[in-house]
Image: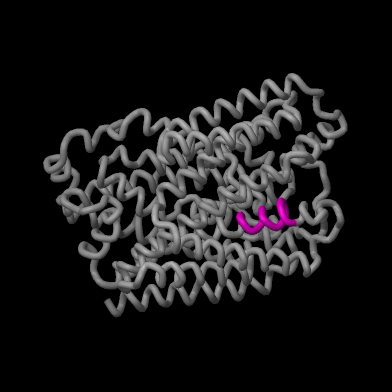
Amino acid sequence: MAVDYAVIIAYLAGMLAVGWWGMRRARSKSEFLVAGRRLGPSMYSGTMAAIVLGGASTIGGVGLGYQYGLSGAWMVFTIGLGLLGLSVFFSARIARLKVYTVSEMLDLRYGGSAGVISGVVMWAYTLMLAVTSTIAYATIFDVLFGLDRTLAIILGGAVVVAYSTLGGMWSITLTDMVQFVVKTLGVLVLLLPIAVVKAGGFAEMKAQLPTEYFAPLGIGGQTIFTYVLIYTFGMLIGQDIWQRVFTARSDRVAKLGGTVAGVYCLVYAIAGAVIGTAAKVLYPDLAAADDAFATVVKDALPVGVRGLVLAAALSAVMSTSSGALIACATVANNDIWSRLRGVVGRGRGDEGAHDEVAGNRAFILIMGVAVIGIAIALNNVVEALTVAYNLLVGGLLVPILGGLLWRRGTAPGALSSVVVGGVAVVGLMAWKGILANEPVYYGLLASLVAYVSVSLATKPTDAAVLAAWRERLAGRTPVPAAEGTVPVG
């Protein structure tokens, strides 16, 4: 294992070094939060794929393949579909808005009255997303070093918090590109073919396993529908995803680069399910399906390769964790704290002020420490992730997509939609259980009814607000000089 340990330690050290380098580039709010909006297609595609394919997509995706066969690909597949939908239909408009958060978009569209409440909902989502990614360090470091769960979470979380705090989005972008390459090599190039060969090839896998393991809908139609509702729609509106869209240097990069990343996710989904199916042949009696990834890596791969594949799993977790962390800190600082203090930075021309960088850096550190603490106290990853996506989709999907697609939507309609949908989701989770399907079904329906009915019953949005909104959507609002124009990647 010495070679494997050396690979992992070198990888972690490299992440910290990149974080230190990124600190030298992040000299303005724009550079720190959205990498100066300068990413070109190659870097944008790689970092977008890295953030959406986290530990749940890698370890969990293989686990679903172990449990259900090829239809276990559906969870990650719906993530890819959501990213494709965002990139093809919405990303160009989102990129042209030149904002930092989803709540700022809602303020622009509805006239500045839904920001704090929507910010709280988005903050809760990004916090839980960061927590679930941080919990996953325990599994990986237990396989690597046999570390205690708490120590593993602190170690993995500390590395992510360190490089994220140092360089913000620049550090996260650069580390995500490394993580994208490592993931591609580790999972698609190495683990996938080796696992299939070890299992005797597809013919042997079909002979050893029940027919339903190779049925496209074997996981169940209702489960697939719930995945679409939560993950596909969740990809359309999450702050962590939008913040990456904001890094694109043009709307064309956002659209085409995101489409490439979406297709990559579809391939990754199938690969994870195939690896899990092969693991079922190799190790038919594992205690838990989520142990399949670590088991096949530990037992089926040669020295050195094993270290690289475990680094791929670690990189998957780190990319999602860092993306969720900076999103959580951005929302907490810009949408909640600044508003509560009566300090609104938009339009003041202070994009390059060093105190704004310091403030956002401090919030990443604070949120990072909070995430590590919650991750240590919380055990159930699936429940935490379900709470996050239920709140996001049930509370924010309707007012966000309604603002983009329906001119008649109003600020009172958006506000009531967020409140009614959020309360319905929380109440139904308390009544039916966190893992039940009903909370997101009925929460989303309640949010839609509230949005439409209240919007139609209230005065239309002011014409000046809509005119300014259309100007931003068309990309006719000047970009502040501090944001820069030199493309990267």
Q: Is residue 203 left or right of residue 443?
A: left
Picture coordinates of residue 365, whole percent (x, y)? 61, 68
Measured as percent of width and height from the top left, residue 362 is found at: 67, 68
Quarter of the image holding residue 406? top right
Residue 361 found in image quarter? bottom right
User: Which residue shows up at 57% across the image and 51% down it?
Assistant: 126
In depth, the one of 374 and 405 nearer the eye is 374
Above or below — where is 375 with respect to 387? below
Q: Main secondary structure of the magenta part?
A: helix
In the rendered image, the quadrant that contains the C terminus is bottom right
Task: Please report the residue visible at 31 percent of the width from the left and 37 percent of the height from the top.
Answer: 71
Residue 177 visible in the current orientation: no
Which quarter of the rendering shows the N terminus? bottom left
Front residue of this view, candidates 337 and 303: 337
Q: In the rendering, at what x and y percent does residue 286 appear?
A: 20, 53
Q: Is residue 313 left or right of residue 475?
A: left
- In the image, residue 342 above or below residue 439: below
Q: Is residue 331 magenta?
A: yes
Q: Is residue 454 left or right of residue 121?
A: right
Please report the residue visible at 86 percent of the width from the left and 55 percent of the height from the top. Answer: 348
Does 444 sit above or below residue 254? above
**Residue nearer the viewer, 196 or 75:** 75
Residue 275: x, y in percent? Answer: 27, 50
How many marks on residues? 0
Q: What span is colored magenta in the figure?
A: 327-337
Q: Which residue is pictured at 58% across the width and 45% down the height?
A: 238
Q: Residue furthest front?
A: 431
Please say whether residue 129 is one of the residues in the magenta stretch: no
